[in-house]
Amino acid sequence: MVRRPQTQAPAAVRAKGAAGGVMRSFPQYVQTAETRVVDLTPDGVDALPVLGEHKYKQAGGGTRPHIHPGMIEIICCRRGANLAFDSKGQTVRFPPGTVFVAQPETPHFLRRYPKSLSTVWIWFRLPKKGESVLGLSAEETAWLVGKLRKMPVRFDASDAVKQSFRRLWHLYDTAPHGTIERRLTLRHAAMCLLIDLVESSSEKKADTSSVRFEALVEEMRRDPSRACNLDELAGRAAMSVAKLTVCFRRHTGLPPHAFLMFCRIAKAKELLSGTDRSIGSIARELGYSSAQHFATQFRRETGQAPYEWRKAHA
């Protein structure tokens, strides 16, 4: 559970803690300008007593070690560099585009709140033996609970997971209150989110941020004509912009934009020496606004004009 220390703590959390200094946290909150938390059980979503989101502009201190009795906490990080939880004595890095899972018996805490942190999260209430949730049969409930209990501490959030979180909030805000429509649509959206989380957590680990980063670098080498939008690149690599820049410097020796320019010049050399295409045509293919702009960049990198380099290397 993410809570800033300067805000008022819920009454249940201020009560006595468990042994060893671990706090027992319950789903009671104080709304703030940075934290929004709602209870979905009055709307018929009996399995989700908590749906929350945090949007912190400034950095701050973290939380104390705590557990959530009878609840599985599932948090999706949307934005926030260098976010990490301590769980089971290990530090779990939690970059944007990933999901952190805390089981009921697992103490965990957040060391600090990074600047511009944005998360969305739920608590799933574990049913009692033989009890059903979300209108499922007892057998279906047991299957769902079993899958949720086996989820890893961290995994990549699929696009479906991100969309399901957005849809659940949208329906909570817009569906008519006190209607059958609201109960059914919210229950369906909650079920979709849980299934998407189960599927995302069981996907093969080949789709990790490191593999995505390597694929991104290879794509820039192969087709350097595309514009370099840092936010887009970071999203595709499932990293923050800061981490993406660090990875580029570590693996290529250059920040992202400079690496793209390097790839463009390398591709230009290949086209100049291997084809008889005009310099203007090459400039357009590589995304330059004009042949003059291309010639200026090329001379800056090589010390020669494009036609001089072609003459020397043809």
Image (tube, helix red, strand yellow):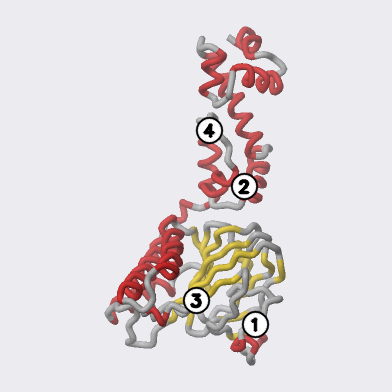
Question: Callout 1: few (<14), some (14-19), or many (20+) C-alpha neighbours within 10 Å?
Answer: some
Measured as percent of width and height from the top left, residue 157 is found at: 47, 59
Q: Quadrant of the C terminus?
A: top right
Does dot 3 land on a helix, a strand or a loop? strand
Q: Nearer the N terminus, badge 1 or badge 3?
A: 1
Q: Nearer the N terminus, badge 2 or badge 4?
A: 4
Front position in the image: 128 or 226: 226
Measured as percent of width and height from the top left, residue 74 is found at: 50, 70
**Mark 2 touches mark 3? (CB < 8 Å):** no
Q: What residue did someone put label 1 on?
A: 9
Q: What residue did someone put label 3 on?
A: 38
Q: Distance between the residues labelled 2 and 3?
A: 34 Å
Q: Nearer the N terminus, badge 4 or badge 1?
A: 1
Residue at the spot 53% in from the left edge and 29% down from the top edge? 225
Q: What residue did someone put label 4 on?
A: 226
Residue at the spot 34% in from the left edge and 86% down from the top edge? 131
Which circle marks residue 55 in the picture? Answer: none
Find residue 160 and report its image quarter.
Answer: bottom left
In the image: residue 141, left or right of residue 8: left
Q: What residue did someone put label 2 on?
A: 244
Q: Nearer the N terminus, badge 2 or badge 1?
A: 1
Q: Distance between the residues labelled 1 and 3?
A: 16 Å
**Mark 1 touches mark 3? (CB < 8 Å):** no
In the image: residue 15, left or right of residue 27: right
Q: Distance between the residues labelled 2 and 4?
A: 17 Å
**Mark 4 touches mark 1? (CB < 8 Å):** no
Question: Callout 2: few (<14), some (14-19), or many (20+) C-alpha neighbours within 10 Å?
Answer: many
Of circles 2 and 1, which is in front? 1
| Amino acid type assigned to the residue bearing label 2 in the image | Leu
Does dot 4 land on a helix, a strand or a loop? loop
